[in-house]
Amino acid sequence: MDEKIRTVLSEHGRFPVDVASIGDDEDLFDAGMTSHASVNVMLALEEEFDLEFPEIMLRKSTFESVAAIRAALVELGAA
Amino acid sequence: MGSMSMGPTVRVGADLVAVRSVAESIACFGDRYLHRIYTDHELASCVGSPSVTSAGLAARFAAKEATLKVLRPSGRRPDWLSIEVVRHAEGWCSMSLHGYAATLAAEAGIHDVAVSLTHEENVAAAVVVALCFGAGSSEAQSVEEFELIGVG
């Protein structure tokens, strides 16, 4: 799952640094992800894992780190 | 000395969006992106060439983010569709808040919001200014859904 998350972040997060250099708990917004890029990340994750983030999970903390994204996907039942 | 009366406080939000990033999102995600973020009215307000559409939508995304900065959600964020830029026939714009966005505004005592949009070839920006008349006022709490008039 982490590899897929990082691939999505690499393709859609618009980071100024290599995603591989970002730690699991490192803040993705501090690392350069914009609000608009986080929308793309959300949509790409939905495609990749065939799910939809409900409004209740639309909070900055859901997408603030690789670990947070992993936890959200697990909560939504992603394999 | 007499006591000072408590007037409204001001909140300001601003945001900047690269037009190219919106164009790429449209190309990559199509309707899933468009209908997840923008209302039918917003989409209808940005009809034109691809560059015109992308610039208009980028300005609207900036307005939504600027409004979030004014609403200051501490946890859950309102859905993007609940923060709408309304374009009037004369060309100026106002903000219309629905659902949880309207609830946050009411809780903050926000009664008036002004919005200004602008875009150039590569970037779009929005500034939102809100007047807060104090959280928890009876007038504020009675507001469930309302339109906030601003300057386009």
Image (cartoon, coloured by chain):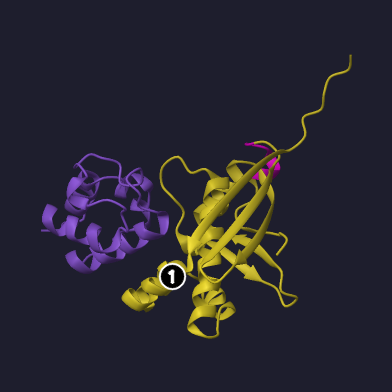
Q: Judge whether residue B152 can be spotted in this image.
A: yes
Query: Which quadrant of the view contains residue A79?
Result: bottom left
- Residue lying farthest top? B1
Residue B152 left/right relative to A4: right
* Magenta stretch, residue numbers: B135-140
Q: Residue at x 71, y 39 (%)?
A: B133
> If the image is split into quadrants, where does the N terminus of chain A sit?
bottom left
Residue B15 left/right relative to B134: left
- Residue lying farthest bottom? B49
Query: Which quadrant of the view contains residue B75?
Result: top left
Residue A56 left/right relative to A44: right
Q: Position of residue B65 (x, y in %)?
A: 51, 55
Chain letter of mark 1 equals B
User: Mark 1: which amino acid?
Assistant: Arg
Label 1 crowd (10 A; few <14 / some 14-19 / many >=20): some
- What residue sits right under mark 1 in the picture? B20
Q: Residue at x 23, y 50 (%)?
A: A69
Q: The chain drawn yellow is chain what? A: B
Q: Image height check: is A8 above or below B137? A: below
* Number of numbered labels in the structure image: 1
The answer to if B91 sits in the magenta stretch is no
Q: Secondary structure at mark 1?
A: helix
Q: Position of residue B43 (x, y in %)?
A: 52, 77
Q: Position of residue A48 (x, y in %)?
A: 19, 66
Please state which of residues B59 and A52 is positioned toward the viewer in this rendering: B59
Colour for chain A in the figure:
purple
Q: Residue at x 59, y 58 (%)?
A: B126
Q: Judge whether residue B98 can be spotted in this image.
A: no
Q: Position of residue B91 (x, y in %)?
A: 71, 74
